[in-house]
Image (spheres, rainbow, N blue to C red):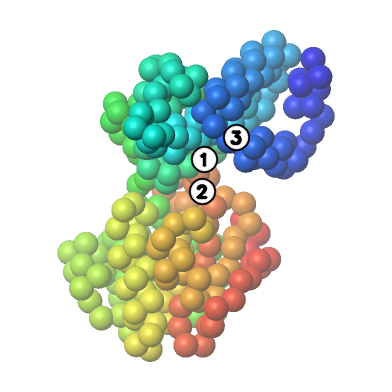
């Protein structure tokens, strides 16, 4: 019961930190196996105590991350000791655990994080290992279980705030239905192949092509344009570190409710301003209240 009381009495941030610390202490596959077993027991306890779905999903997320870490540790341990390869038996892991952990380990990190965030945003869904395995196996479209869609429409209120400041001349990535400026590029014109000049607004596709869009924004800014980008705040990605941190980053409070979305986005967002008048800076943008 002590574990259950900890979960009920500890606030969410402190609990998240505690679980992260547990993951950091895993040093070998046996540690990971014990951690997964602990999470299994905590899930059972959470259900028996009637903890809410958010708390249950926090434990389920920890179990999923422990399995992913276990898969990484199995790979790291697969070295040659003398002339004999390390076996699963040596590691104290069975074949089933190895396969499941390996599948979750190899699942693209962005997809996994999007799945976790999408479940949290929904508020009424259960986070499961089966859901992650289904994504990895392609048994469900990613768009149904993650945030991977490319038509998130900019909230009108947010655009109006930015437009009052920048007086945009060009929407570089739009559709006829969602364009925010009189002059805009759609897929027909292929904004990536066009010249971006003046004060530009960009809400790019959020799939695999986002790297190309923020790269284009950075290049255009170096050539004299001011490009205001509305992007996911994915500071763990290469495209963020390669392109976004060179401008003024305005972190937005909470999760945006895009105009064509039924729920809030399953990811945090930021406004990144690229241009010669906007050197690298981080702003907690209090003006935006969500």
Q: Quadrant of the N terminus?
A: top right
Q: Quadrant of the C terminus?
A: bottom right
Image mark for residue 267: 2
The x, y position of residue 184, in whole percent, is 29, 72
Name of the residue lying farthest toward the front: 82
Residue 168 visible in rendering = no
Q: Secondary structure at mark 1?
A: helix
Q: Choose top left, top right, bottom left or bottom right for residue 78.
A: top left
Residue displayed at 34% across by 79% down: 219
Labelled pair 1, 2 in contact (Cβ < 8 Å): yes
Residue displayed at 69% across by 10% down: 48
Image mark for residue 170: none
Image mark for residue 117: 1
Q: Which residue is mark 3?
A: 26
Q: Secondary structure at mark 3?
A: loop
Residue displayed at 62% across by 52% down: 254
Could you classify mark 2 by the number of other residues whose Cα lies within 10 Å: few (under 14), some (14-19), or many (20 or more)? many
Could you classify mark 3 by the number of other residues whose Cα lies within 10 Å: few (under 14), some (14-19), or many (20 or more)? some
The x, y position of residue 69, in whole percent, is 51, 35
Q: Earlier in the sequence, mark 1 or mark 3?
A: 3
Q: Nearer the viewer, residue 281 or 107?
A: 107
- What separation in Å lies between label 2 and label 3 (alpha carbons)? 28 Å
């Amino acid at each position: 019961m002590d574990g259950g009381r900890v979960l009920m009495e500890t606030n969410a941030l402190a609990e998240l930190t505690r679980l992260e610390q547990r993951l950091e202490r895993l040093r070998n596959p046996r540690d990971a196996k014990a951690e997964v077993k602990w999470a299994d027991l905590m899930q059972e306890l959470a259900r028996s105590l009637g903890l809410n779905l958010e708390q249950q999903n926090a434990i389920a997320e920890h179990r999923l991350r422990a399995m992913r870490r276990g898969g990484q540790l199995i790979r790291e341990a697969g070295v040659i000791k003398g002339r004999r390869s390390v076996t699963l038996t040596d590691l104290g892991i069975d074949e089933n655990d190895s396969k499941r952990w390996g599948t979750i380990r190899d699942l693209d990190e962005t997809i996994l994080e999007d799945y976790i965030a999408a479940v949290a945003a929904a508020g009424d869904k259960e986070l499961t290992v089966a859901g992650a395995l289904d994504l990895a196996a392609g048994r469900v479209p990613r768009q149904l279980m993650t945030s991977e869609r490319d038509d998130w429409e900019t909230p009108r209120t947010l655009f109006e705030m930015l437009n009052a400041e920048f007086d945009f001349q060009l929407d570089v990535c739009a559709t006829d239905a969602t364009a925010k400026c009189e002059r805009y590029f759609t897929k027909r014109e292929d904004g990536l192949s066009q010249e971006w000049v003046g004060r530009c607004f960009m809400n790019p596709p959020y799939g695999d092509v986002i790297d190309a869009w923020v790269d284009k924004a950075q290049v255009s800014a170096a050539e004299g344009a001011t490009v205001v980008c509305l992007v996911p705040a994915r500071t763990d990605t290469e495209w963020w570190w390669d392109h976004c941190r060179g401008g003024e980053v305005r972190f937005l409070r909470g999760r945006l409710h895009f105009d064509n979305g039924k729920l809030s986005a399953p990811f945090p967002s930021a406004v990144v301003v690229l241009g010669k008048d906007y050197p690298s800076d981080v702003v907690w943008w209090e003006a935006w209240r969500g």
